[in-house]
């Protein structure tokens, strides 16, 4: 089901569009204007400047070209005075057009209205408003979920197969790569997020568990929890060459990893030895090994306090060390059973969970003193932050505890909400990575509950989650968000990075709800002379859906519209339009030839044998079209 909040926004925007277009005709940017130059649209005192340019390796800009990364930018300001307008939520879409004419006001209106509707009818070439939820599953795979649109009732956008179950993961700051530790096969999988493909499986030492990226992204640090001297330490991987840069023996036991703000030092806990190792990042050698307590199990570096905080599970103390990790400056006494330690976004306070006592401790960084000990849910084990709250997961029950950050100096104001029906620990799925992550929407989080096999969407101020996503019979044990939407990167400037797959002319549809601004800009993407010219796929296949959701055990009729991509006319009388339908992950499949029913329309029918996600692929041997050349459809079958 679609999120209620998202649907409410879509309905509000859709309802108000006709009124906005009726108020005035849209002023269009001249198609003669060079698309490489910024274009400006002004309406009722608001100015929107649009620009796009590729990003070269040297950081210089040039004409947009196919297969290059480009930065799309909108700058919004008041005409009088030039004041920038921040904290807005603009929406934008990029759509390739076959004709040379830019969209007129009516066409622009129709484009935006169609883009706001869920389903197959009309999708843009590039949607600048989407984000994806990544779920690290108990099974050896990662679910990629599109929460805003989805196809045919299914929001499962992709499923990435791994060589073994993932334990921890980290995404690069530019959101291009994802690194996943696979302890059962002693590897780290490297995933290209743009294509959702595993591009490398790297040897990462014995039993790789925790993974961490430096702030500058140069080295990936992997904690090896294996037995023996060779298995106790850190494997350092160069993210440029994807080669092992060093293997450093630090000590026995599980390892947690932290960095100084300037990446000059890496800190590694050695749980069994009770020590903290400091490693010179430039030389990749261990420089200190300090005894910190009994069973150190969590670490955090405070830039504000210029100190390293280590939570010791065995003796219940929090050791405070200097920024070299050599000397203990203070020791805060709590209770044995300490787990994860996290610093608040402003750096003023630290929070440490205690799974054994179901307590969270709050300490003041300036005084190195525990100021609150707050009872929370059974088996508390993780802490995540939004701008306003700390979220604490309890593995022993279904509730998530919220602590208001603004009041931490005086009190710990606590509330909670249920994130599902079952306690997460009822599932065997366990991960070092976060099961709660902030959503792109302000004041909202996503919560994975592996026992429910669900992902819940919660927005602050509500008594319960506003919606949920199925994980299609898989146990989600950790979450990440891949956000491709426009983000405010400077006051009044909203940007994102895109890659154009082909050259051509494009319309850039822009919508701002408040203040009300609607316009279609234009842009052109040039041919890339360094690329071989791709062959155009002879046909395009679009679904014509009457019944969007197949029902298990009942015949489902799928009608398809086939268009000749050269003439843009219906393609009739194809005798070998092959259709492959299979149930993910491939446990059932059916192949058949589609039957022509007139005017470029074709039909197939199948009976889904069980609930699940079904993929529909197409081929046409006579036209040289293979199964992998047309984007497949995705359908979700449910019980009646």
Image (cartoon, rainbow, N blue to C red):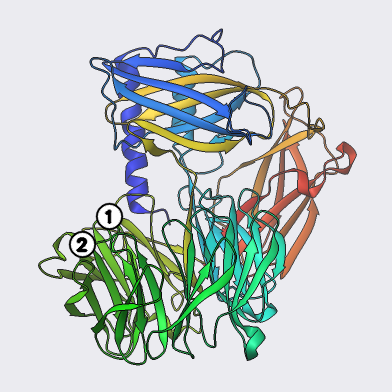
Left or right position of 175 against 444: right
Residue 227, located in which quarter of the rendered image? bottom right
Left or right position of 586 against 371: right
- Give x and y (percent) for residue 620: 83, 43
Q: Secondary structure at mark 2?
A: helix
Whether 196 is drawn above or below 338: the answer is above
Front-most of residues 640 and 59 = 59
Report if the CB atoms under discs 2 and 1 are less than 8 Å apart. yes
Residue 405, located in which quarter of the rendered image? bottom left
Residue 256 is at least partly visible in this image: yes
Whether 322 is drawn above or below 630: the answer is below
Residue 474 is at least partly visible in this image: no
- Give x and y (percent) for residue 419: 33, 71
Q: Which residue is mark 1?
A: 387
Left or right position of 363 against 616: left
- Give x and y (percent) for residue 204: 67, 73
Q: Earlier in the sequence, mark 2 or mark 1?
A: 1
Q: Which residue is mark 2?
A: 405
Image mark count: 2
């Amino acid at each position: 089901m679609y999120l209620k909040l998202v649907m409410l926004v879509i309905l509000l925007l859709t309802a108000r569009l006709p009124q906005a277009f009726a108020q005035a005709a849209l002023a269009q940017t001249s198609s003669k204007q060079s698309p490489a130059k910024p274009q400006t649209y002004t309406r009722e005192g608001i100015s929107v400047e649009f620009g796009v340019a590729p990003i070269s390796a040297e950081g210089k800009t040039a004409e947009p070209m196919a297969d290059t990364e480009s930065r799309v930018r909108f700058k919004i300001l008041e005409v009088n005075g030039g004041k920038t307008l921040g904290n807005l939520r603009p929406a934008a879409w990029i759509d390739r057009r076959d004709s040379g004419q830019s969209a007129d006001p009516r066409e622009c209106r129709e484009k935006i209205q169609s883009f706001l509707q869920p389903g197959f009818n009309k999708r843009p070439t590039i949607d600048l408003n989407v984000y994806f939820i990544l779920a690290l599953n108990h099974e050896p795979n990662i679910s990629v979920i599109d929460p805003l649109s989805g196809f045919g009732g299914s929001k499962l956008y992709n499923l990435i197969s791994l060589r073994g179950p993932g334990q921890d993961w980290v995404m690069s700051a530019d959101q291009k790569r994802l690194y996943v530790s696979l302890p059962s096969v002693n590897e780290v999988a490297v995933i290209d997020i743009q294509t959702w493909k595993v591009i490398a499986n790297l040897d990462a030492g014995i039993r790789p568990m925790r993974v961490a990226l430096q702030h500058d992204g140069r080295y990936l640090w992997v904690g090896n929890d294996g037995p023996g001297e060779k298995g106790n330490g850190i494997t350092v991987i160069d993210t440029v060459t994807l080669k092992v840069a060093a293997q450093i023996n630090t000590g026995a036991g599980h390892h947690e990893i932290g960095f100084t703000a300037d990446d000059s030092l890496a800190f590694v806990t050695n749980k069994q030895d009770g020590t903290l190792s400091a490693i010179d990042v430039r030389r990749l050698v261990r420089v200190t090994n300090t005894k910190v307590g009994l069973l150190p199990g969590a670490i955090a570096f405070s830039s504000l306090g210029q100190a390293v905080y280590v939570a010791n599970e065995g003796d219940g103390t929090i050791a405070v060390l200097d920024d070299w990790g050599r000397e203990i400056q203070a020791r805060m006494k709590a209770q044995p059973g300490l787990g994860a330690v996290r610093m608040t976004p402003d750096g003023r306070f630290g929070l440490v969970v205690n799974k054994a006592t179901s307590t969270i401790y709050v300490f003041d960084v300036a005084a190195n003193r525990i100021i609150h000990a707050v009872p929370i849910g059974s088996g508390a084990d993780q802490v995540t932050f939004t701008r306003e709250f700390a979220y604490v997961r309890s593995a022993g029950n279904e509730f998530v505890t919220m602590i208001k950050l603004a009041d931490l100096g005086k009190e710990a104001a606590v509330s909670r909400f249920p994130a599902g029906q079952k306690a997460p620990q009822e599932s065997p799925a366990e991960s070092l990575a976060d099961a709660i992550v902030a959503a792109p929407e302000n004041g909202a989080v996503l919560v994975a509950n592996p026992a429910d096999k669900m992902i819940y969407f919660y927005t602050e101020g509500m008594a319960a989650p506003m919606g949920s996503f199925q994980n299609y019979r898989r146990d989600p044990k950790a979450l990440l968000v891949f956000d491709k939407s426009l983000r405010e990167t400077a006051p009044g400037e909203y940007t994102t990075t895109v890659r154009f797959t082909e050259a051509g002319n494009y319309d850039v549809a822009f919508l701002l709800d408040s203040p009300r601004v609607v316009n279609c800009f234009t842009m052109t993407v040039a041919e890339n002379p360094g690329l071989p010219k791709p062959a155009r796929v002879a046909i395009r296949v679009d679904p014509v859906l009457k019944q969007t959701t197949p029902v298990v055990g009942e015949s489902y009729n799928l009608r398809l519209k086939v268009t000749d991509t050269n003439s843009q006319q219906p393609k009739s009388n194809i005798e070998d339009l092959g259709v492959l339908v299979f149930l993910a992950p491939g446990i059932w499949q059916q192949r058949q030839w589609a039957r022509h029913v007139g005017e470029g329309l074709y039909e197939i029918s199948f009976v889904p044998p069980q609930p699940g996600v079904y993929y529909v692929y197409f081929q046409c041997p006579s036209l040289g079209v293979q199964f992998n050349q047309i984007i497949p459809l995705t359908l979700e079958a449910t019980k009646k």
